[in-house]
Amino acid sequence: MSATSSGKTAFHDLSAFFATPRVGALALSPDGTRLVAAVQSLNTEGTAYVSGLWDVDPAGEREPLRLTRSVKGESAPKFAADGTLHFLSGRENTDAAAEKGEGKDGATLWALPERGEARRIARHPGGISGYALAARTDAFVYSGSLLPGAADAEAHAKLTKAREEAKVTAILYEGGPTRFWDHDLGPGEQHAFVRGLAEDAAPVDAGGQGAVDEGGVALSPDGTRVAYGRFVRGRVPNENRSAVVVADAATGAELHVVDRPGFQYDSPVFTSDGTAVVLVRELEETYETPYDMTLVRIDVATGEETDLLPGFDNWPGGVAVSPVAGDGTLWFTADELGHHPVFRRDADGTVTRLTASGAYGSLQVSPDASTLYALRTNIDEAPVPVRLAATGEDQSPVALKAPGTLPHLPGTLTEVETTGEDGFPLRAWLAVPDGASADAPAPLLVFVHGGPQGSWNAWTWRWNPWPFVARGYAVLMPDPALSTGYGQKMHERGWGQWGGQPYRDLMALTDATEARDDIDETRTGLAGGSYGGYMANRVATSTGRFRGIMSHASIWDTAAFQNDSDASWFFRRIFGHSETRPERHRANSPVLGASRITTPMLVIHGALDYRVPVGQGMALFQDLQRFEVPAKFLYFPDENHWVLKPNHAVVWYETVLNFFDEKVKGEEWVRPNLL
């Protein structure tokens, strides 16, 4: 979408911005001739995003072609060994033999041949949450729920129907956790089911995945082995962890459970010969030390574990393996200095960075392992499919034609660098509006990222800086202590002190930015969400330098939050229990500085946020009123940690922009029309 003759862009019009198609997951056919992308677009009412599948030319010559279209949408594209495209969809089954009431199944698995109509090949009562296909056979594995007492999918269906008819929604927990992000867990547990594509094939239950299904499922190329993540409850919540199970696909018998004290395992990927599975291994955090990550290889025959990246200082993920038999090469991505490059690991352990800039994901490898396809994005670039060589340092990949491009920006992107008081080098992204100069300096907004383990390195639709730049603001996106991509030292220097070293780094980067002659240091604001919202609260209790502060999905009282969050055990390992180890709560909890706040604040929270429960936002708003601080509270009864509904997102941007226009620019407050 280009600029108009008046210089206006999609970032000046929020409706146009949110109508832009959003490119998601990629899938490459076994012969390398077809590349399919999942693309989200607004529905006809403009009230929700619906995903459809698009054919993208791997050569980058022809225009993309839409392959699917339905009210429910299609997602998670994958190719089977014979080249048939598969996807998940909640679309209605129009087969004349379909059973009555199948529309309640949720997502089901479909197959779309290169020519012909899609047909449904697998369903599970309650829906399929994820799946994987074997590279060389017709076997596949999917995740589906089983209720307590249900021995198989058929029994699960009967129990589900009985609960529905009795109007029973109650859940009996005999251990935690009970919630995850935005939904209640249970009463069912996700299981990994393996079966072939034959219509009458009965699924094999390969085992339960535990209360929280984050580990994914994988199938060996020959379909004989299955690997999946399993959430393991500890004796006490602090000992909860993630493991990976490798099982026999034909019987479901467990062959190996990759589960070691002090470590977490997830994201299994089989090697091309099926003799090993590659996992992400996380060194579990403790009160004293931060967590760390690497890639490991698990031998399927012996269970032997090998660290594939000893000495690699950043955290890897997004693994793709060579499809060539006997080739031990793999590719992965990792945050690095404000980017998220692609790395190649050769069989001898040599690691090479393949991309110079940008953030990459959804890696796909050509059949001969000579070419990679990926989604590339950056702070100033919406996701786009690209092609690059599988070897060669610091490449500039070729962009492919796809929906959803936004080529014109209302400003420019640059970097800010400075040094922390401990001598550690610090950096940040800075988006500067067109026309900003020493004669017309721009007001500044500081955006603090969540996590806190995270980095500003990719395009985001939720906290996009460019609508703010279009309104005339410069936007600083800093990576303070605890950010990823700067080595383990970056985590160590901020560990256990969320409001300490990260706060000092944030102020140092803000100081360096305000020293620029195109920035107006007298007109600044700050905003953050999740951990960034915590930091916004911490900033509000620590300094009056900002004219306005926005706090989204934020932690206000660390002790109360820790007991109410869906992942309380994770935070307790870092902060300690507030009764037995109160030191870090006393040093870091913003609520203890409530009386010091003088900066006007905008508080935003969703009622379905179980990671940072809405009571945190409500308590903050109450304290702001108690101390007579000018404040507003934007509340979303049906949103979670993120604001996802398109029209709610528009309201979010309008409210935040208008708040800063009032507090930072000194303009009259304008209440959004729909509020």
Image (cartoon, rainbow, N blue to C red):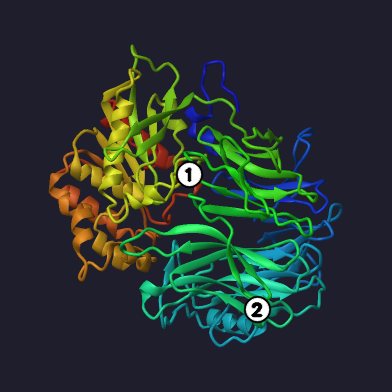
Q: Which mark is residue 117?
A: none
Find numbered disc 1 in the image and state the secondary structure of the residue it sits on. Answer: helix
Find numbered disc 2 in the image and state the secondary structure of the residue it sits on. Answer: strand
State which quarter of the image contains the C terminus: top left
Q: Nearer the viewer, residue 164 or 641?
A: 641
Please state the horizontal and vertical placement of residue 43, each as a whole percent of the image. Answer: 61, 46
Q: Nearer the viewer, residue 418 or 198?
A: 418
Residue type, mark 2 in image: Ala
Please state the horizontal and vertical placement of residue 526, each as a whole percent of the image. Answer: 31, 37
Please state the horizontal and vertical placement of residue 42, each as a whole percent of the image. Answer: 59, 44
User: Residue at left 44%, top 34%?
Assistant: 465
Q: Which residue is mark 2?
A: 206
The image quarter containing residue 131 is bottom right
Distance in Å between CA atoms under marks 2 and 1: 42 Å
Please state the horizontal and vertical placement of residue 303, each as a whole percent of the image. Answer: 62, 74
Q: Spot the residue most to the top.
A: 439
Q: Is residue 471 left or right of residue 114?
A: left
State which quarter of the image contains the N terminus: top right
Q: Spot the residue most to the front.
A: 348
Q: Earlier in the sequence, mark 2 or mark 1?
A: 2
Q: Nearer the viewer, residue 625 or 482?
A: 482
Q: Which residue is mark 1?
A: 647
Q: Residues within 10 Å of mark 2 (few under 14, many from 20)?
A: many
Q: Spot the residue most to the right.
A: 115
- Position above or below: 236 against 107: below
Q: Residues within 10 Å of mark 1 (few under 14, many from 20)?
A: some
Residue type, mark 1 in image: Asn
User: Residue at left 75%, top 46%?
Assistant: 35
